[in-house]
Amino acid sequence: MNQLKEKFIGSRSFYARVLAVAVPIMIQNGITNFVSLLDNIMVGQIGTEQMSGVAIVNQLLFVYTLCIFGGLSGAGIFTAQYFGQGDQEGVRHTFRYKLWMSLILTAGAVCLFLTFGPSLIQLYLNGSSDGGDLSAALSYGSGYLNIMLLGLPPFMMLQVYASTLRECGETVVPMKAGLAAVTVNLIFNYLLIYGKFGFPALGVTGAAIATALSRYVEAFIVLAWTHRHSEKNPYIRGIYHTLKVPASLAKNYFIKGIPLLVNETMWSGGMAMLMQCYSVRGLSVIAGLNIANTINNVFNVVFIALGDSVAIIVGQLLGAGKMQEARDTDNKMIAFSVFCCTLVALLMLVIAPVFPGLYNTTAQARSLAVRFIVVQAVFMPQNAFMHAAYFTLRSGGKTIVTFLFDSVYVWCVSIPIAFLLSRYTDLYVVCIMIAVQLADFIKCIIGFVLVKKGVWLQNIVRDP
């Protein structure tokens, strides 16, 4: 018992260190998701078609968001280890690489959505029309998408700067910028969705304008602070004197990063595909999933922030060559993440019967939402372990392994299960979701074995 306690439970100073990194990330993501929740409820008060159209677009934009995340993550592994060594020039190189990568991805996303946006939305509207008008949902979604594209450039710049700040240990400033952004978003949501204080009532269009505006505010705050505090961020000095990245380093970043980019693209695309599989059961399913995912995202910030903390803290220890400390820290952080998410899951179960009642939608959609939330809560500890294991493997540069562990598994196991059960059986849609989640237990076993074997214990900025 004492050995288990020593292996999985840390000291007060250990948890203080972990929480110092995790809490600001948790607060920023939590507030962002909470305002998204309020935004979602506001749109949900208008009607099922509006809510469903926005939900579909947000699922598509989620693919872009994770493309950016994956594109920057490869260089981010090096950033954390460069920072652990005190190599500011190395941090500059990763920053510039991130800038080029995010610019290419954003330009591609804008072209794709402008050309094929309505067709992509239509993929989710081929089921039954129970609970709403499919053509109206398509119209609302298309209008919402066109305005949301205006917010992609500031989002791109924000991710380049904020990810670098976090990897260098600065998590408070992105949190404060997030606070300001969500305040702007919430205020203008209220003014523009419902037409308050003389503003026009724009509905879904107003929600998109408010979101795009908030992204410009958030990006401005982070960029301005970073450049005005160069003594805290020495890598930012002369950052734009050149945009060149040494070819050998760019090759290393690309080799390590491309599996992460492909992984995040395939994984987010897989999540979109799962939603598409569920959507063939009707518009009420889309509405129910939207409600459930909205509250689930608020609670998911716990294991997401703790997973990010694994990448930052363990990555810095690996960069400093402290392998045994990295292993010990990782064990305790994984255990802490699972424990915290078990408590969060219990809270979700309490909220599940109440939350869907806030939406102006059909009784069927609300009933489905309750069941979806319960399923998500039950499997949250499992997801927390998988997330922490993923970031453990990634912190040591095992990007090929994470690619196989994450997105390949989704496309080879999860999606076939959902596709076959949704199209070729009459199984209740909630049972289909349970089947998909149960299949992830195999992934947990794989993650446990890989983490325990220590295949991730390497210093990639020093080792060949």
Image (spheres, helix red, strand yellow):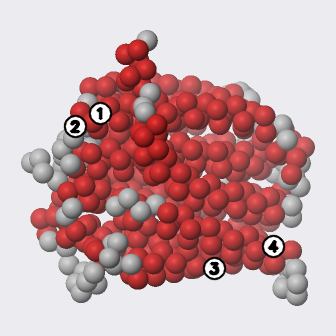
Which amino acid type is marked by label 1? Arg
| Residue at mark 3 to residue at mark 4: CA–CA distance | 14 Å
Q: Residue 159's spot in the image, x, y percent? A: 44, 67
Which amino acid type is marked by label 3? Leu
| Residue at mark 1 to residue at mark 4: CA–CA distance | 48 Å
| Residue at mark 4 to residue at mark 2: CA–CA distance | 51 Å
Q: Residue at x 47, y 44 (%)?
A: 16
Q: Residue at x 48, y 75 (%)?
A: 222
Q: Earlier in the sequence, mark 4 or mark 2?
A: 4
| Residue at mark 3 to residue at mark 2: CA–CA distance | 44 Å
Cβ atoms under marks 3 and 4 closer than 8 Å: no
Residue closest to the eye, 454 or 426: 454
What residue is shown with label 1?
327
What residue is shown with label 3?
213
Q: Residue at x 83, y 46 (%)?
A: 356
Residue closest to the eye, 26 or 106: 26
Disc 2 on helix, strand or loop?
helix
Residue 323: give its label.
2
Look at discs 1 and 4 and give the one toward the viewer.
Answer: 1
What residue is shown with label 4?
190
Which amino acid type is marked by label 4? Tyr
Image quadrant where residue 89 sits = bottom left
